Amino acid sequence: MRGHREKVVALFERHRATPGAPYEADHFLDFLLAKPRGKRAVYNSFRGLRRFNAFIDEVQLEFGICFSLKDREANYSLDRFVERVVTLERSRRSSLASLGNQMKAGPGRTAMFVAGFALLVVAIWLHRHPWAVGALVAVGSVIGIWFARFSRQVRTYQATLLARIGRVDEEGGGP
């Protein structure tokens, strides 16, 4: 478990805004930010969430595990986080179930469909103003292209993680 802790801390330091700065182990994830303002601060900013997600993604690939959504929302202490990594490493089924649920849910396709439908309704409402419809088409196109890229990145990461979990399982790391 000591080796796990050292790896987790090394990954944590790699994703911090200020590597090497002191941090409180009881809510270490908040210290991915340079100056966290209290507990759960990492969850309250886009910058914090970006760092948090990158850290979690790298931990998952490093150990061949997948955190559940509940795990991602928990603000674990460093020791509890390492314990959770070890637990997931020993239970591949749990990781595979979490990853399967994430793959089924997809990267927000429902929200994208609703946004596209809303843009269509607005375009119909503004049909007498071609410049406005053109602007909506442009905005919709940019959003669609961005979402397609994001969706592809998510699917690629999930496929890589699935292969990693399977490879570790084949190497004898799982039950």
Image (cartoon, rainbow, N blue to C red):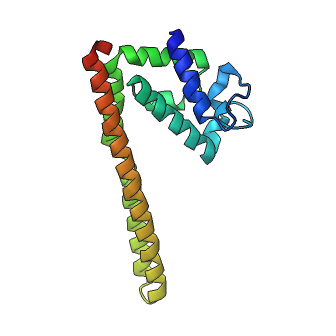
The residue sitting at 35% across, 33% down in the picture is: 161
Residue found at the very far left of the displayed protein:
170
Q: Give the side of residue 39 with respect to residue 75, left or right.
A: right
Picture layout, residue 136 above or below residue 94? below
Instruction: Name the spot of residue 32 as percent of width and height, x first.
Output: 64, 34
Q: Give the side of residue 143 with respect to residue 169, left or right.
A: right
Between 103 and 115, which is closer to the camera in this rendering?
Answer: 103
The residue sitting at 30% across, 32% down in the picture is: 162
Instruction: Name the spot of residue 68 as percent of width and height, x first.
Output: 43, 29
Q: Quadrant of residue 69?
A: top left
Picture layout, residue 126 above or below residue 42? below
Q: Quadrant of residue 138?
A: bottom left
Instruction: Name the spot of residue 128 as percent of width and height, x first.
Output: 44, 90
Q: Give the side of residue 45 with respect to residue 2, left or right.
A: right
Instruction: Name the spot of residue 121 as percent of width and height, x first.
Output: 40, 73
Query: In this view of the protein, can residue 174 be seen by the observer?
Result: no
Residue found at the very far top of the displayed protein:
1
Numbered disc total = 0
In the rendered image, the quadrant that contains the C terminus is top left
Between 91 and 12, which is closer to the camera in this rendering?
Answer: 12
Query: In this view of the protein, can residue 156 be seen by the observer?
Result: yes
Q: Quadrant of residue 126?
A: bottom left
The residue sitting at 54% across, 22% down in the picture is: 8
